[in-house]
Amino acid sequence: MGAVVIILSYLLGSISFSILVAKKIAKIDIRQHGSGNAGATNTLRVLGKGPGIAVLLLDAAKGAIAVGVAHWLTGGNDWVIVLSGIAAILGHNWPVFFGFRGGKGVATTIGTLLALTPVPALIAVVVTVAVIAVTRYVSLGSLVFFTLIPVILIITGASLAYIIGTLIIAALGYIRHAENIKRLLQGTERKLGQSKR
């Protein structure tokens, strides 16, 4: 049952709402516009606030649903629950339905972690929003979010499955943001609301 739940979580994560919404609204492949990323931030830049917020919520829901269903079907098996959340993020990043070209997994990670560890995730969200509000760098805020949660869990003595799981999620976040990190260090990263030069 655990393996089935994890596979289903990956397939759920592979439903790329930014691609589907962009095709429905504007008849475009979102991956060929803006930053080329199939995610909420690029949808916001290319299609505006409404579609951007819709994609954010739908992508976050994928992670939360994967965790919730895993908890329900396994009776609370920590490892299956954590791996199901990771599988949903992997599906978003490398979706089987869209040629394995997906997004960076931020919204799905937010949904996953809010379902996995609500209080640490909410703390991290508040800090992340503050970082983005001050710096206007969505990527920097995302990196702060990925980093804070395993740190909080280690400090509070959470279960090993959750600590390892959130460290893996953080590593995935850093891998998907490698180019953003490079641009942040070079001072060339685009800020929220800044048009592409």
Image (spheres, rainbow, N blue to C red):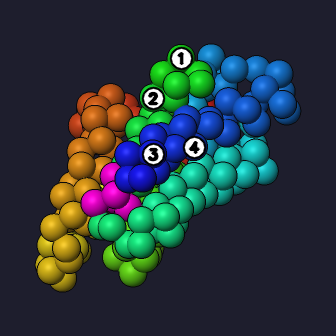
* Mark carried by residue 12: 4
User: What residue is pinned by disc 3?
Assistant: 4
Name of the residue lying farthest toward the front: 1
Q: Mainly helix, strand or loop, the magenta region?
A: helix
- Amino acid type of the residue tagged 3 in the rendering: Val
Which numbered disc flags the more N-terminal residue, 4 or 3? 3
User: What residue is pinned by disc 1?
Assistant: 99
Closer-to-camera residue (142/170): 170
Q: Is residue 44 magenta?
A: no
Residue drawn where x is 28% and y is 60% of the image: 79
Residue drawn where x is 42% and y is 72% of the image: 75
At label 4, counting other C-alpha atoms closer than 10 Å, the crowd grade (few under 14, some 14-19, many 20 or more) is many
Q: CA distance from mark 2 to mark 1?
A: 8 Å
- Amino acid type of the residue tagged 4 in the rendering: Leu
Nearest to viewer (mark 3 / mark 2): 3
Point out the stretch of residues depicted in magenta: 79-84
* Mark carried by residue 67: none
Q: Secondary structure at mark 3?
A: helix
- Amino acid type of the residue tagged 2 in the rendering: Trp
- Amino acid type of the residue tagged 1 in the rendering: Gly
Query: Is the C-beta separation of discs 4 and 1 under 8 Å?
Result: no
